[in-house]
Amino acid sequence: MVDVLLGLQWGDEGKGKIVDYFAGKYDIIARFQGGPNAGHTLYVNNQKVVLHTIPSGVFHNNTLNLIGNGVVLDPVTFKKECEKVAALGIDLKKNLFIAEKTHIIVPTHRALDKASELSKGQEKIGSTLKGIGPAYMDKTGRNGLRVGDVLKADFETAYGKLKTKHLQLLANYDFTEDITEWEKEFFEAVAFLKEMNIVSGEYWLNGYLKEGKKVLAEGAQGSMLDVDFGTYPFVTSSNTISAGVCTGLGIAPKWIEEVIGVTKAYCTRVGGGPFPTELEDETGETLRQAGNEFGATTGRPRRCGWIDLVALDYTCMLSGVTQLVMTKSDVLDAFDQVNACVAYEINGQQTREMPFQLNGLSIKPVLEHFPGWTEATAKSSAYSALPAEMKKFLSFVESYLNVPVQYVSNGPGRDQILEK
Ligand code: GDP
Ligand code: IMO
Ligand code: MG
């Protein structure tokens, strides 16, 4: 069986911590989309670790980890990440596997990402500049290189062809940088990648499923960044919703059981694009400081706002979410009043449905108000011991979304999580 864990907002919901918490219950943790744009934070022996491409199960002895074909892998960032994890005593040759159909990010993908963003000016997406968009464009454009290609004798020739194509495109953007150093680093990293466990991801995973092994598919980014259903064009380039699991791993839908959706008790977004509940005032700043809302990949300050139940209802529907994990409840400890957006008011009309496009619309979030709590949820040792006001807020969220909040995470630490 396969359970899926994914973010329901605009990313950074705390997926890494929650996957790490659940990982012991699973035999395999598999990433199915995204790439080094992700930054998943976990605490191992009280030490902070940020993972980008490697699944968040690597710190568990009896868990195998798969980078699925739906991921885009940059050998350069991957090598650095592996070295960081290996320094913590983890033998990745034993517990990490990479699907041979995983697409590769080459240095000119990063250059194209940057050039494309610069050319957009005010309209820029706010990409992490890791080459994600250009790499997925080459995948769907049928020009890409895959991890299995690095094992072939003609890899350098294939790489050269792709680079030439990219340099032609980059010429339109006045790109003049010397890429010799980048290429040197890239080929060193490719040599490193060749030594890792490169497998047929789909046979590898289906084989284990037939043996009865339990798999957790780890989402990256968030559902509102999904290329089809997110706030297009301010999205990432992959399917971040549960449908992406089948194509991103090569498994049939029949294997999927629980879909665990992770949401913060409020909401954040990093990069450009619409954000109906955004607070561009002192309250937003308090959320940012209390929640330490600065990007795990880019260090950029995250935009902050109240929880958006219209968006959550939409993303729960898209992925068929069966249970919720609410993270960062402790951050709301700082507030006398907590708000939740229950409808969008557009041109004087209220709606609970996600419009075709959010940008260009003047959206007033309709807020439901809840009294804050005086006891710190950070100190609660059991779900039942959460302050009564917090419980009211939780049951409102549950009834609006019609999905149970099965877990509340009340701090960044590995054990700071309460089960219902
Ligand atoms: P991810 O991309 O979804 O894995 O999330 P990130 O790692 O980018 O961002 C989540 C941040 O919140 C990290 O700094 C986590 O350490 C932190 N975090 C996770 N859960 C909690 C929580 O319940 N409370 C607090 N205060 N911090 C949390
Ligand atoms: P995790 O897995 C938050 C955002 C970027 C930008 C848009 C497109 O840590 O939750 P891209 O680099 O994909 O072309 O950027 O998507 N973005 C994320 N925001 N968390 C992430 O990942 C993100 N990955 C991409 O900020 O707005
Ligand atoms: Mg993150």
Image (tube, rainbow, N blue to C red):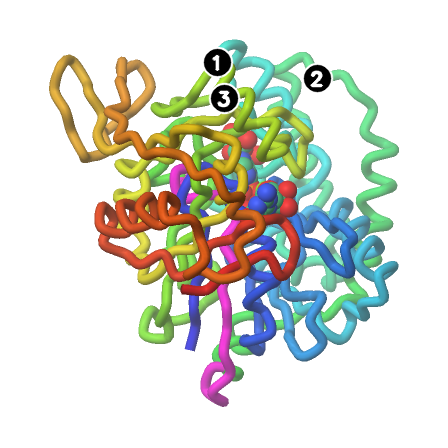
Side of 255 relative to 209 (left or right) = left
* Amino acid type shown at disc 2: Phe
CA–CA distance in space, label 1 to label 3: 5 Å
**Dot 2 crowding, Cα within 10 Å, few <14, some 14–19, many 20+:** some
Query: Percent position (x, y) of residue 30?
Result: 55, 65
Q: Range of the magenta residues?
A: 209-226
Say what secondary structure mark 3 lies in. Answer: helix
Q: Residue at x 59, y 56 (%)?
A: 416
Say if the magenta span includes residue 212: yes
Side of 274 relative to 330 (left or right) = left
From the image, state whether disc 1 or disc 2 is nearer to you: 1
Q: Which residue is mark 2?
A: 175
Front in this rendered view, residue 174 or 193: 193
Q: Which residue is mark 3?
A: 284
Front in this rendered view, residue 108 or 267: 267
Q: Residue furthest bottom?
A: 211
Instruction: Write down which quadrant ligand 3 falls in.
Output: top right
